[in-house]
Image: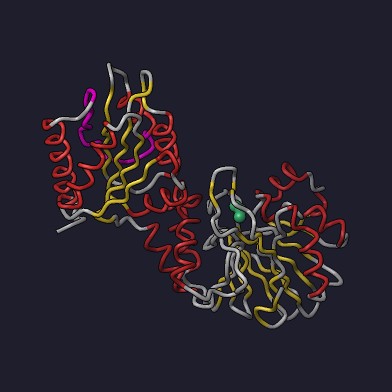
Amino acid sequence: MAEIKPNVWSVGVNDWDRRLFDELIPLPDGTSYNAYLIKGGDKNALLDTVDPPKTTQLIENLLRAGAEKLDYVISHHAEQDHSGALSDILMFYPDAKVVTNPKCRDMLIDHLGIEGDKFITVADGQTLSLGDKTLKFIYVPWVHWPETMATYLVEEEILFPCDFFGSHLASSSLFVDSEPTVYEAAKRYYAEIMMPFRLPIRKNLQKIADLKIDMIAPSHGPVYKNPQFIIDAYKDWVGDNVRNEVVVAYVSMHESTKKMVERFVSTLIEAGISVKQFNLVNVDVGKLAVALVDAATIVIGSGTFLTGAHPVAAYAAVLANALRPKARFASIIGSYGWGGRMVDQLTGLLCNLKVELIEPVVVKGCPGDEDFAALNNLAQEILAKHKEAGIVD
Ligand code: FEO
């Protein structure tokens, strides 16, 4: 708990021990559920709450920051890590009203059973005075849910954008103390949940472009005193540019696919293409997601399990399909024992991706010289495609 500007308090909680989000996303550095108390001349407002197990700590922080009363709880986003303590906060501060947009109100009623008369709904661009402080609400849908909004504290020029610009990073430092560290964590966060919505996020970036922002205080991770750092990073991630890079994600049961991957990756590197290679058996899906943010090409390698793709390769394809990276090209390599529909299955699972499928290389049994020549051709074709697309000179 600390004051980030006069009468603006960070009252959220670090979760140092959490190691998984959505029962899927690894959190190597834990996370934080940031909440902020703004004490105005007439009214007090709490911006968001915390994940339910951290409710007691939030209330302790509010009391230590001097919040004897709360007039408003601004709810930016209905997901439980920010709204889960809302019912308890409303019991503790029974006079407080929940300020949010109509879509978020409906979701809070559905998810938490909050009574309808507890809400004040606000329109996009509407303001709310706390006396000497003014809150301006800005809808920022699809970062990563449809109802999300941000608050801009006009007098202090602080943007509170909820998940937008956040990072899963528990830290003793309230503010960003190492931009490279936060860059990696924020990129990972973007990759894991924001990437499918890069076009709406572009619109949201335009929406905040004219605001004078001195500080960005997100709902996860440290506060940005240099907001341009994270705004520029987001502009890069949501832009159309891709890198001369291939993500090779594979699983191999009896070494055939592994031999193909090793030769293929060597050939790509010799051709001047950078590669991120992942063995899917023990993959950190966060790292795989980060690699998908910028790569021009995705190649999935799979052996054939019974009559189809190895389930672990299918999992990677489903994940990539859900994350919808901006890759331009894709291919498949792998092997089979007696037959199967591995390629058809994997291409079907990648149906959301706007990629050109380059002819797969699939071999029967252990790869031989002809197969390695085919892999060499695939690498050269990828290089040619990258050149045609202006990704590499
Ligand atoms: Fe941090 Fe979408 O909740």
Residue at the spot 68% in from the left edge and 56% down from the top edge? 82
Residue at the spot 13% in from the left edge and 39% down from the top edge? 377
Give residue 314's quadrant in the image.
Answer: top left
Q: Is residue 10 above or below residue 141?
A: below
The location of residue 266, given as percent across then percent down, is 20, 48
Give residue 124's quadrant in the image.
Answer: bottom right
Residue at the far bottom: name it.
Answer: 6
Residue at the spot 56% in from the left edge and 62% down from the top edge? 169
- Dominant SS in magenta: loop
The location of residue 52, given as percent across then percent down, is 74, 52
In the displayed structure, does residue 306 sit left or right of residue 54?
A: left
The location of residue 39, given as percent across then percent down, is 76, 76
Quadrant in which the C terminus is drawn = bottom left
Nearer to us in this view, 121 or 273: 273
In the displayed structure, does residue 238 sit left or right of residue 384?
A: right
Residue at the far front: name it.
Answer: 254
Nearer to us in this view, 201 or 337: 337
Nearer to us in this view, 71 or 253: 253
The location of residue 156, given as percent across then percent down, is 62, 80
Is 306 contained in the magenta span?
no
Find the magenta span and give its range. Answer: 350-365
Nearer to us in this view, 304 or 109: 304
Q: Is residue 176 above or below residue 360?
A: below
Residue at the far top: name it.
Answer: 338
| Way the structure is coloured | secondary structure
Give residue 118's quadrant in the image.
Answer: bottom right
